[in-house]
Image: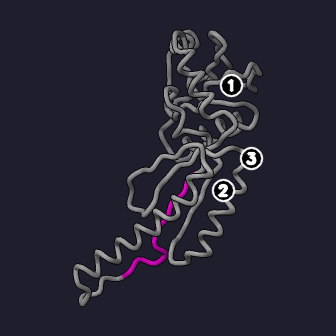
Amino acid sequence: MIELYAITDDPTPPDPPLRAVRSDGMAVLYAPAERRAVTAEALWHHEHVVEELMAGRELLPVRYGTFVADPSAAAEALAGRRDELAASLDRVRGAVELAVRAEIREPEEADSTESGRDYMSAKAGRMAKADLVHDRLSPLAREHVLRPGPELLRAAYLVDRAAVEHFVSLVRRLQESHPELDLLCTGPWPPYSFAGEAQ
């Protein structure tokens, strides 16, 4: 049993214990699978391995817990998918994923005298602020994905590596100009949200 970490077109061999199986110009980077429980530590180990790989090559990350029987099975998974995997790799080439969440800094306590209209107006105002944050950030990204969640905004942005500092700086400026919001920007991450067929 082996665990898959990433797909790449970079011919550089990975450092042991990682190995590569190649097919038609593409490679799956893998390691012998270790039997372990799904824990936060195991998830972070997988993430750490993918981030180290990302530092030295362009890649499509493979989600944690992707196992196949052996290198032959990994090569078979690659076979016939070169064009779609190459297109997905070109989509993320030179970019990383940045995640942004926006919440109200201090949840407002319900006011028993507040009317339904006032409540809905306040809620619409909070949503408009989250939309404003997204509208300012999205032009700096190649693509974005909005996700449902309890936050006002939960989004992933595919950002050119050279633009990461500018993106993060804009998040800081938005935080300063909207102190009522709590903005959290994390990354750079491997582009999980944009890996397409590799997932």
Tag nearer the camera, 1 or 3: 3
**Amino acid type of the residue that numbered disc 3 sits on in the rendered structure:** Ala
Asked whether, in this view, residue 5 is left or right of residue 122, the answer is: right
- Residue 8: image quadrant is top right
- Name the element at disc 3: helix
**Amino acid type of the residue that numbered disc 2 sits on in the rendered structure:** Phe
Is 105 contained in the magenta span?
yes
Category of crowding for the residue at label 3, using alpha-carbon neighbours closer than 10 angstroms: few (below 14), some (14–19), many (at least 20): few
- Front residue (pair 123, 49): 123
- Residue sitting at x 65%, y 30%: 59
- Residue sitting at x 49%, y 52%: 155
The colour scheme is one colour
Is 150 contained in the magenta span?
no
Q: Which residue is mark 1?
A: 18
- Name the element at disc 2: helix
Q: Which residue is mark 2?
A: 167
Q: Earlier in the sequence, mark 2 or mark 3?
A: 3
- Front residue (pair 28, 110): 110
Tag nearer the camera, 1 or 2: 2
Q: Earlier in the sequence, mark 1 or mark 3?
A: 1
Marks 1 and 2 in Cβ contact (< 8 Å): no
Magenta part of the protein: which range?
99-108
Q: Earlier in the sequence, mark 1 or mark 2?
A: 1
Q: CA distance from mark 1 to mark 2?
A: 33 Å
Above or below residue 155? Residue 89 is above
Category of crowding for the residue at label 2, using alpha-carbon neighbours closer than 10 angstroms: few (below 14), some (14–19), many (at least 20): many
- Residue sitting at x 55%, y 75%: 178
Residue 84 screen position, x and y as percent: 53, 20
Residue 143 screen position, x and y as percent: 55, 43
Q: Which residue is mark 3?
A: 162
